[in-house]
Amino acid sequence: MKYGRILLKLSGEALSGEQGTGICPEVLSTISAEIKDLIEAGVEVAIVIGGGNIHRGVAGATIGMDRTTSDHMGMLATVINSLALQDNLERKGVNTRVLTAIDMQEIAEPYIRRRAVRHLEKKRVVIFAAGTGNPYFTTDTAAALRANEIDAHVIIKATKVDGIYDKDPMKHKDAVKIDKLKYIDVLNKGIKVMDSTAISLCMDNEIDILVLNMFEHGNIRKAVNGDKIGTIVTNQ
């Protein structure tokens, strides 16, 4: 096994499926099944999930909403998604803990790094909710931060495409897939893998980002085993 401990970054939009907003039960079940497969293989799995299917902080700010208020709403949206994923995983027999950056002890544990690591060592899926707990930071940055804090071996960014292309493969049939990128090239070329803060944090701490299609069954398991899947962003 190439990666024994991973941080899986999911977008909130991915949970909405074809309906565009909200949470699609079928998509939630598909994601949970892939995660269960990883746990059964002995992988330690942490997850950061976005809230764009419910509310995006930046989008709220563009229509005149106070940015800090809008970002706090986005953080709460990630908690809703995290609880939905936890429920689905638990119903599949996977032990799960939700840890939030904003104190809400009635529904989730507060984020404490050592506690998160102990949960992972006990083979519980750890879902990090509410981003970093601060406005003006995205869940991409939260994923990079938490991955470094728990000493994850890689960040796996789950998308609907099988890697990074030189242009949008949904719009251009001649788009060419890139197998490997350096962080500095991602920053210089403005490639939209994760936001620049997250990319810089990963580059400085030498943690790789693997971009792949999560909705192709078994892709994450193959990546964890070392198969050439998706696109790797690395310092090497």
Image: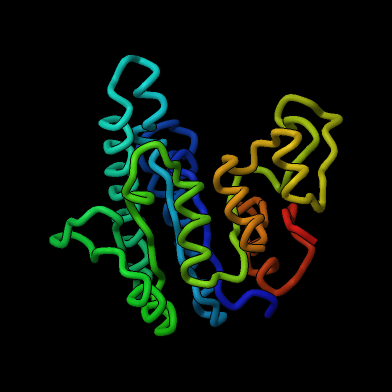
The quarter in which the N terminus is drawn is bottom right
Residue 90 appears at what percent x and percent y?
Answer: 32, 69
Q: Nearer the viewer, residue 29 or 209?
A: 209
Work out whether residue 164 can be spotted. yes
Q: Residue furthest top?
A: 63
| Residue 217, placed above or below residue 93 | above
Compared with 151, 25 (above or below) is: above
Left or right relative to 57: residue 179: right
Q: Is residue 192 above or below residue 87?
A: above
Residue at image point 27% right, 43% down: 76
Q: Is residue 104 shown left or right of residue 43?
A: left
* Image x and y of residue 167, in percent: 77, 31
Residue closest to the eye, 144 or 20: 144
Give 101 or 97, whichever is nearer the viewer: 101
Q: Position of residue 176 (x, y in %)?
A: 85, 38
Residue farthest to the left?
106
